[in-house]
Image (cartoon, rainbow, N blue to C red):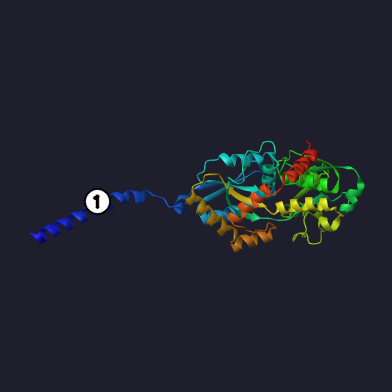
Amino acid sequence: MLHWIISLASLRRNMIAAFMLLCAAPLTASAQTPDAFYKGKTVRLVVGFSAGGGFDLYARMIAPYLAKELGANVVVENQPGAGGITATNRMMTAPPDGLQIMLVNGLAAAFGQFTEQQGVRYDLAKLEHLGTVSGNPWVWLVTSTAPWKSVGDVVADKRRYMWSAGGPIDGLSDGAAFTCAALQLDCNVVLGYPGSNDSALSVAKGEMDMMYIVDTSAANYVATGQIRVLATMGRARSRIFPDVPTIFEAAKLSDAAAALLDFHSTAEKLGRILVAPPGTPPERLAVLRVAVKAALTDPALITEGDRTQRNIEFSSAEDTRKASISVVSDPTPEQKQRMIAILARVEKK
């Protein structure tokens, strides 16, 4: 009898275990791991500028490597408008499904936010950061036929200078604004160009006098022979243009002017950053961050970037987030008001 009771109890335990396993089986079969989620899916890589410019070229170079890491199709989608502000605003309210990311101009986005530019509705602290692609120095371009051979020539000429730009804060426009303020130049920054490619064309044609742009993009324009570099706008020379002097070497700057250019140069190191919409599920965000790191540290991509003068300098998601927030938060109220005044004074359509 005792043996029968033990056997019956054992049978009941086995039946319960089998029933639980049977119930769990459909859930296990239908559940998706984050990695499996991306297999065969389409991920949109948004660029807030038109095709052909520096950000577009970087995105199209990165896309195949990111696709390989995710097992997904990664397509570049251009959404030009207001120097990237329009696309960044959209990213704030985009579906947080992990299927849309954006290559952002970190400098422009940070400046747009902390100077409270009209139309800015994004918050860098709330966007999900995936990492930094690169943080190259920026340079000052003029048409190859321009009479100015040095920064000193520009300062001495005393004319009104026309700078080409896209939106109120896009790197091109704020760089021009800070340069004009530091050197006390009479400038008019003309907005409305869809991307750096269009801005460069306006300088090459002689419609505009000058342009402020990252050195990797400048390399493509200088290669045409229609544009040349006047100065590198930081303390260190550009690796792409090693013979071009820095603005600190080329001009006699007051302490206030040097501080202004130093701050802008530090902000420029934010470079090109990758972000996702706020609220992206943590498990998908983790997969994206792993994929971004793997893609941007792939020796093949780094080699391709060096060959095409679009170098890759990866920084982690956390380091990118900290750097973005510091540029937004570090300036004192007095510094912030001065920068707002500088931008308001020279940015005219």
Image position, residue 219 (x, y; %) = 75, 55
Of residue 157 and residue 320, the one placed in the foreground of this image is 320
What is the quadrant of residue 78 in the picture?
top right
Q: Is residue 142 visible?
A: yes
Query: Does 219 sit above or below residue 96?
Result: below
The residue carrying pointer 1 sits among few (fewer than 14), some (14 to 19) or many (20 or more) residues within 10 Å by Cα, namely: few
Image position, residue 77 (x, y; %) = 60, 44
Q: Amino acid under label 1?
A: Phe
The C terminus: image quadrant: top right
Q: Seen in the image, is 297 located left or right of residue 187?
A: left
Q: How many labels, in total?
A: 1
Residue in the picture at 62% in, 53% down: 322
Q: Is residue 226 visible?
A: no
Q: Seen in the image, is 58 located left or right of residue 215?
A: left
Of residue 139 and residue 145, the one placed in the foreground of this image is 139
The residue at the far left in this view is 1
Image position, residue 122 (x, y; %) = 62, 41
Of residue 11 and residue 160, the one placed in the foreground of this image is 11
What residue is disc 1 on?
19
Of residue 90 and residue 196, the one placed in the foreground of this image is 90
